Amino acid sequence: MTRRPFLLLATALLALSLAACNPQTPDDAAKQPGPAPTTPTAPSGPPEGALSLTDAIAKIPTGDERRDGYERDNFKHWTDEDQDGCPTRAEVLIDEATTKPEQGERCTLTGGAWTSSYDNVEVTDAKRLDIDHMVSVPATA
């Protein structure tokens, strides 16, 4: 198996974790100016013309991996931004697990399973998953 599916999974996990980086509590929302928050309603389904995750993934262009321009030292490594005892890597693994891992001392994870949306491969060893600051860049003409 190539590393590409794992890099794609890592990119997806990073995107999801970044989208959740600034959660608001109801108290935070009440302090914000503007209209009062509304009670969420059940989604009525995907918007017209929306793709399923599987169909959207199938439309992602593939190409050879390029690592030029990426310098890992330019990024902080697995900080504990919310100071809950779990570094970002562990939080992403916990959040994205299809079978939740056990949390031990200092947020050490054991067990768990993760399934790739790209190829349905299940991984049960978190050490085999890349969660990094990789960003996919469209190929230039």
Image (cartoon, rainbow, N blue to C red):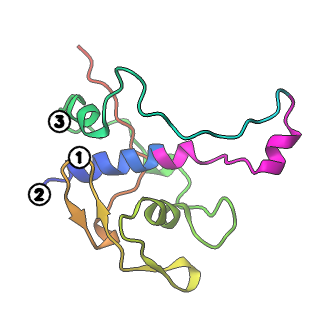
Real-space Cα separation, disc 3 to disc 1, in angstroms? 16 Å
- Residue 64: name its quadrant: top left
Indicate whether 89 appears above or below 6: below
Tag nearer the camera, 3 or 2:
2
Q: Nearer the viewer, residue 41 or 9?
A: 41
| Residue 13 in picture, x, y percent from top left | 41, 50
Identify the mark nearer the N-term, 3 or 2: 2
Q: Is residue 113 above or below residue 140?
A: below
Residue drawn 69% across and 66% down?
Answer: 83
* Figure check: 60 above or below 104: above
Residue at x 64% of width, y 73% of height:
85
Q: Which residues are magenta?
A: 16-33
State which quarter of the image contains the N terminus.
bottom left
Left or right: 21 in relation to 121? right
Residue 93: within the magenta? no
* Amino acid at dot 3: Asp
Residue labelled with disc 2: 1
Q: Residues within 10 Å of mark 2 (few under 14, many from 20)?
A: few
Please identify the residue farthest to the top as the structure is shown: 141
Helix, strand or loop for disc 3: loop
Label 2 near label 1: C-beta < 8 Å? no
Mark sitting on residue 64: 3
Q: What is the residue that sits farthest to the left in this orientation?
A: 1
Neighbours of disc 3 within 10 Å: few (<14), some (14-19), many (20+): few
Of labels 3 and 1, earlier in sequence is 3
